[in-house]
Amino acid sequence: MKTKSNAQPKVNVITLGCSKNTVDSEVLMGQLKASKFDVHHESDQDADIVIVNTCGFIDNAKEESINTILQYAEAKKAGHLEKLYVTGCLSHRYKDDLQAEIKEVDAWFGTLDMPHLLRTVGADYRHELIGERMTTTPKHYAYLKISEGCNRPCSFCAIPLMRGGHVSKPLELIVKEAENLVKSGVKEIMLIAQDSTYYGLDLYGERKLAELLARVSDVEGLEWIRLHYAYPSQFPMDALKVMAERSNICNYLDIPIQHISDNMLKSMRRGITQRRTLEVLNAIREEVPGIALRTTFLVGHPGETDEDVKALLDSIDQIRFERLGVFTYSHEDNTHAHTLVDDVPAAEKQCRADAVMAKQMEVSWAFNQSLVGSVQKVLFDRLEGDEFVGRTQFDSPEVDNEVRVPATGNYVRMGDFADVRITEASHYDLFGTLI
C-alpha cells in the first residue's frame, strides 16, 4: 500500500491513439510540470496518479483503451496508485456508459476538459504556457497541432462527435510554438490537424495554409517541415508554390483520399469525385516535382462492391502513391454510415485490406529501387541492434519507410542529419552507407 508523503504527487500519463493525442498529452504534462508535479510518460514504476488519454476512433482503438483503463483499475485496487483519471476521445464519447461500468476511475474528462482535469488533480491551468510542453517523441522531432476538430461530414468518421467542429489555432501562436520547439532542440516538425487544408477558414475567413507554411518555414533553425492530413476536396493550391519554393519543407504530403470509386466517395460523403481527385493529385505532382504522396484507404464501407474494390486496386497502379496505409470500416454509433447496413463481413474487409497492401508492395518496391545509387539526406532517429536507423524527407516517423546504415565502421549522432548513399532496397526499407 502506498504511503503519504509531503512531496508533490507522481503522475504517470498514458497516451493511446494518434499524434493529435500525443500533443494533448504533452501539453497536459507541461502544465503539470509547471505546477511542480513529478510527471512521467508511460512509466513502468508506480505512481500516485495515472491519467489515461484514450482513443475512440474505431473498434480496435476503443478496445485497447478500455483494456488499458481496466489494467490501471486493477492496479488501483491492488494499492499501486491512489487516483485514476481518464481523458481523451473515448472518455468524451462514452463517459456515461463507462463511469457506470468502471467504478475505480475517479473522474472522466472529455477532449476539451484539460483545465477541469488540472484543477481536479490540484494543478493550475497556465494560459501563458504558449506551446510549452513535455515532448514524448525523440528530442529532434515533434508534432505541432494547427487546429482542433473537423467540419467535414464524412459518413464513417466519429471525430466531430469527440473533437467538435474545426477551430484553427492563430498563426502567431503556431509560429511561437514552432520557435519554442526549435529552441528545445527540435529539427523536424510535423504539422497535424484533422483537416489541415481547412486551416484559417474559420478564423480569418479564408484558407491560410500557404501563409502558415511560409511563416513556419521562416523559423530559424527548423530544418524539416512535414504536412499531414490534407483533405483532397477544396485543396488550397497556393500552398503548393510555398512547398516547392522552401527548401526546409519536405517533398512529402499526407493526403488521405479514402476511396476512388464515385459510388463509394458519394456514400462516404467525401465531397469529391474520382475525376476531381485525380486532377488534384496530378496538380500536386506537377507543382511540386519529386513529391512523395502518402494516402489512406478505407475498405469495407457499407455498400462497397467488388467493382469498387477493383477500382481502388487499379488506382494504386495508376496513381502510384509512394506511401499508403489502409484500415477496415468500423460501424460507429451516431455516424451517418451507422444508418446503413454493415453488409461486408469482417473477414472480407480484412481480405480487401490485404489485397490493397499486396498491390502497394509492388509500387513501394519500384519506388525504393529507383533510389538505389542516389544520395539521400537522412535524419537519424535511433540505434537498433547493429544499425543506425533514420528517414529521408519522404518518410514520416513510425508510419513510413526507414533507412538502415551499419553501425560498424560508421558513426552518427541520433538527431543529426547525414548524407547516405543508398546501396540496396527492400519493399519498405532502404540500406546504405554514410558519405
Image (cartoon, rainbow, N blue to C red):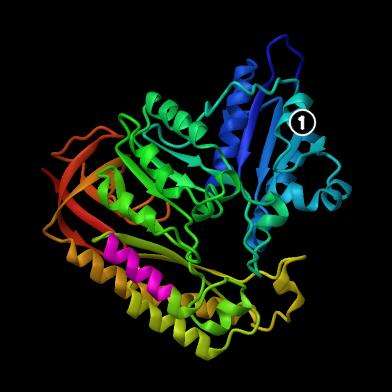
Q: Residue at x 75, y 48 (%)?
A: 92
Q: Is residue 293 visible?
A: yes
* Magenta stretch: dominant secondary structure: helix
Q: Residue at x 43, y 65 (%)?
A: 295
Above or below, comparing residue 30 to residue 257 in the picture: above
Residue farthest top in this picture: 6
Looking at the rendering, in which quadrant would you find the N terminus? top right
Looking at the rendering, in which quadrant would you find the C terminus? top left
Q: Position of residue 83 (x, y in %)?
A: 77, 30
Q: Is residue 434 left or right of residue 211?
A: left
Above or below, comparing residue 33 to residue 174 in the picture: above
Return the residue nearer the eye: 295 or 11.
295
Residue farthest right in this picture: 100
Q: Is residue 210 left or right of residue 414?
A: right
Residue 94 in magenta? no
Which segment is the magenta one? Answer: 277-287
Give the mark count.
1
Q: Is residue 387 visible?
A: no
Above or below, comparing residue 324 to residue 239 in the picture: below
Q: Position of residue 383 (x, y in %)?
A: 31, 40
Residue farthest bottom in this picture: 307
Q: Position of residue 188 (x, y in %)?
A: 36, 39
Residue farthest front in this picture: 205
Q: Could you classify mark 1 by the number of other residues whose Cα lies within 10 Å: few (under 14), some (14-19), or many (20 or more)?
A: some
Q: Residue at x 58, y 25 (%)?
A: 30
Q: Which residue is mark 1?
A: 116
Q: Amino acid at mark 1?
A: His
Q: Is residue 1 left or right of residue 174?
A: right
Residue 278 in magenta? yes
Residue at disc 1, secondary structure: helix
Above or below, comparing residue 289 to residue 397 in the picture: below
Q: Position of residue 19 (x, y in %)?
A: 52, 46
